[in-house]
Image (cartoon, rainbow, N blue to C red):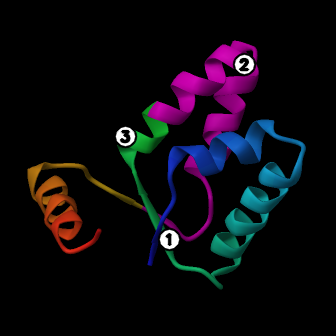
Amino acid sequence: MYYLDSNMVIYASGDSGVKGEWCRSVISMIETGSVSACTSYLTFDEYFYKIKKEFSHEDAVRLSEIFLNIANLKFIPVDKKVITTAHNSLQNTQ
């Protein structure tokens, strides 16, 4: 399972170049179920914070609704257990 970072949806929403195209294709793979992915509610906050600076309020709300409704994207809670697990995995990588 992959983690969908806020940058993926930021580029998918606002970049018309290669990065944006690639991010949109990854999100499409999530929607079709060919890639398994999750994200956190914190990602939503980061995403909305960024897009509300670049788009009108109405467009930011519309885009954030699209993000919240990405098919097959699992939202995980962020709590101390999740953060501790993430931190422990850092100890195993360099």
Measured as percent of width and height from the top left, residue 43 is found at 44, 43
Please name the residue shown 55% across and 29% down the image.
48
Taking the magenta stretch, the answer to whether it contains residue 84 is no
Q: Dividing the picture into quarters, in which one does residue 87 lie?
A: bottom left
Vertical placement of residue 66 versus 28, above or below: above
The main secondary structure of the magenta stretch is helix
Classify the position of the N terminus by image quarter. bottom left
| Sequence-earlier tag: 2 or 3 | 3
Count of marks overlaid on the render: 3
**Mark 2 to mark 3: distance in Å?**
19 Å
Return the residue nearer the eye: 22 or 28.
22
Classify the position of the C terminus by image quarter. bottom left
Q: Dividing the picture into quarters, in which one does residue 72 lie?
A: bottom right
State the mark number for residue 37: 1
Horizontally, residue 38 falls left or right of residue 86, namely right
Horizontally, residue 46 falls left or right of residue 9, namely left
Measured as percent of width and height from the top left, residue 57 is found at 68, 14
Q: Label 3 belongs to which residue?
A: 42
Q: Dividing the picture into quarters, in which one does residue 21 lie?
A: bottom right
| Sequence-earlier tag: 1 or 2 | 1
Q: Label 2 belongs to which residue?
A: 54
